[in-house]
Image (spheres, rainbow, N blue to C red):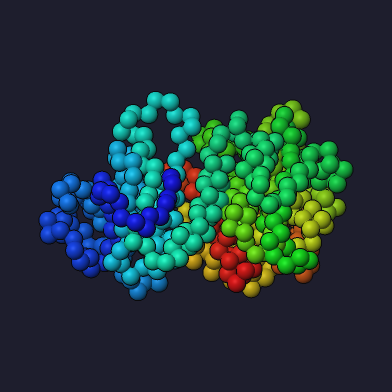
């Protein structure tokens, strides 16, 4: 969806015009019949409410929509404004209307708030209909343009920043949505190379031969049952001070997860195409940072594998040696993401020596039992890092909830024949998974692990996304960068 700003009045009124309305505060100048219709429909300007009707303006019949933005002084003001923009898109996306004018004249919104409305409108309009060949006309998106009028000075610049964020979220949604026969380790790399070309991001790719030489037996053990070779994708953005240590974002990229020999139940297995949601979020974040020329140094690392159960697949009970030299008894081949992350994190520490590491992974079903689909879990060895990420989650809407790490949990993954096993007992599964990863984090390295299993895919539409891929993680990491690395 294209968004453009217009300063001069149009030669004739737009067919569809929207205004942003604060709660219980109908704007001046609205036609009495429109006000009456809104009140009859119980429109009160609450966040996400939309009312539309037809009026005569200058001899033309115009469709006017009112979008509720809630109370002006609310702490959630920006989120409410995003909902207003998103609600407009949701109402008119398949309505037959092709353009929407949002008139901000007469509102008290500043440039940042205008950009929030537009961000919500843009994100809610994303759809991936590439493989749909028989959509009925009334199901096809028609709304392709939003024209902004009456916006305060600086709104276009504020939107340019948010547009970069929107593009990153959309790229993540694209990667997560694509089926596993289209996106696998090699094609994930190719898609990123194409999308990031010309942005200033340096890309390095390690193939399975290079990773074998480096001793990445944990990651490669996951991949050995698939005909699709593993890859390690490294994306570097140097927008900060030369010589400053970068922050590393590390993503789990299991492009499809059957569970391996510990095979998953058939029902719902198709969802496992999004088991690369952590890597997708890292790729989308790197795109956003480059597009908005973020003043920081960041490296994105994605461990990319496919977990399949062929005759060469690793077996429950196998022992693998990680790049760190630590040995792992693989009790359950469906606990594969931590095997990918441990080698990716070890490589990142040895090769990049970052200032801090944040990993993202659709790691455990246990986190969904704990938190549902409202929060991702955060585990960290550093209170300041955990606090900054949690605050970024609240500000961006990609919310986090902190879980404990402790030696009492750590002993649950001790193995009788190796340094550790890859799963603990039934209870506390998301915690023991984090304890496993922590064993590969160097002493003194600030680290946070985000278990995002319940957040990357939605079974129903949300405020700023349709059913399907949410793009979770990009807004979180971008806000963390803005507030902590650039702030």
x and y percentages locating residue 275 in the rendered image: 60, 43
Relative to 118, say whether 15 is above or below: above
The quarter of the displayed image where residue 379 is located: bottom right
Q: Nearer the viewer, residue 128 or 17?
A: 17
Identify the residue at horizontal 22%, vertical 48% (top origin).
63
> At x 45% / y 60%, what residue is drawn?
156
Q: Up-down: is 97 above or below 435?
A: above
Side of 2 where 414 appears, left or right: right
Residue 69 horizontal/vertical position (percent): 32, 63
The quadrant of the image that shows the C terminus is bottom right
Residue located at (30% from left, 47% from top): 91
Residue at the top extreme? 134
Describe residue 393's horizontal placement relative to residue 355 as left or right: left
Q: Where is residue 380 in the image (x, y as percent from the top left)?
A: 65, 66
Picture coordinates of residue 279 (x, y %)?
A: 63, 48
When the figure is inspected, residue 382 is found, relative to residue 216, above or below; the finding is: below
């Amino acid at each position: 969806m294209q968004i453009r700003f217009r300063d001069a009045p149009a030669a004739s009124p737009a067919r569809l015009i929207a205004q942003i309305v604060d709660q219980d505060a109908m704007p001046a100048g609205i036609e009495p019949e429109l006000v009456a219709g809104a009140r009859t429909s119980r429109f009160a300007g609450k966040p996400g409410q939309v009312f539309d009707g037809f009026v005569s303006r200058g001899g033309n019949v115009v469709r006017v929509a009112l979008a509720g933005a809630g109370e002006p002084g609310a702490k959630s003001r920006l989120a409410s404004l995003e909902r207003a923009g998103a609600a407009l898109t949701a109402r008119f996306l398949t309505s037959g209307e092709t353009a929407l004018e949002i008139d901000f004249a007469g509102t008290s919104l500043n440039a940042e708030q205008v950009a929030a409305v537009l961000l919500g409108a843009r994100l809610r309009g994303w759809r991936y209909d590439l493989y749909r060949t028989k959509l009925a006309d009334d199901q096809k998106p028609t709304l392709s343009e939003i024209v902004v009028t009456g916006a305060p000075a600086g709104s276009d610049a504020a939107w340019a920043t948010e547009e970069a964020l929107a593009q990153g979220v959309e790229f993540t949604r694209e990667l997560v949505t694509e089926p596993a026969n289209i996106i696998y380790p090699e094609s994930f790399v190719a898609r990123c190379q194409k999308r990031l070309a010309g942005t200033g991001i340096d890309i390095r790719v390690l193939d399975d031969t290079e990773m074998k030489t480096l001793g990445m037996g944990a990651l490669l053990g996951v991949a050995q049952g698939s005909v699709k070779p593993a890859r390690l994708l490294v994306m570097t953005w140097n927008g900060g001070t030369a010589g400053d240590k970068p922050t590393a974002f590390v993503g789990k990229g299991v492009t499809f997860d059957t569970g391996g020999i510990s095979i998953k139940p058939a029902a719902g297995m198709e969802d496992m195409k999004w088991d690369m949601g952590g890597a997708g979020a890292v790729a989308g974040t790197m795109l956003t940072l480059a597009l908005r020329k973020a003043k920081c140094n960041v490296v994105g690392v994605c461990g990319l594998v496919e977990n399949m159960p062929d005759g060469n697949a690793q077996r429950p009970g196998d022992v693998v040696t990680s790049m760190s030299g630590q040995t792992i008894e693989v009790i359950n081949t469906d606990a594969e993401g931590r095997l990918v992350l441990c080698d990716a994190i070890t490589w990142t520490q040895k090769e990049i020596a970052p200032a801090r590491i944040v990993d993202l992974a659709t790691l455990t079903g246990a986190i969904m039992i704990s938190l549902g689909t409202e929060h991702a879990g955060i585990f960290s060895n550093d209170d300041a890092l955990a606090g900054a990420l949690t605050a970024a989650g609240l500000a961006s809407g990609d919310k986090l909830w902190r879980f404990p790490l402790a030696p009492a949990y750590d002993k649950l993954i001790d193995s009788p024949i190796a340094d550790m096993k890859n799963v603990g007992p039934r209870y506390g599964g998301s915690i023991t998974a984090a304890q496993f990863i922590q064993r590969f984090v160097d002493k003194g390295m600030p680290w946070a692990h985000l278990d995002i299993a319940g957040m990357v895919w939605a079974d129903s539409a949300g405020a700023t996304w349709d059913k399907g891929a949410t793009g979770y993680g990009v807004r979180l990491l971008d806000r963390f960068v803005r507030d902590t690395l650039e702030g």
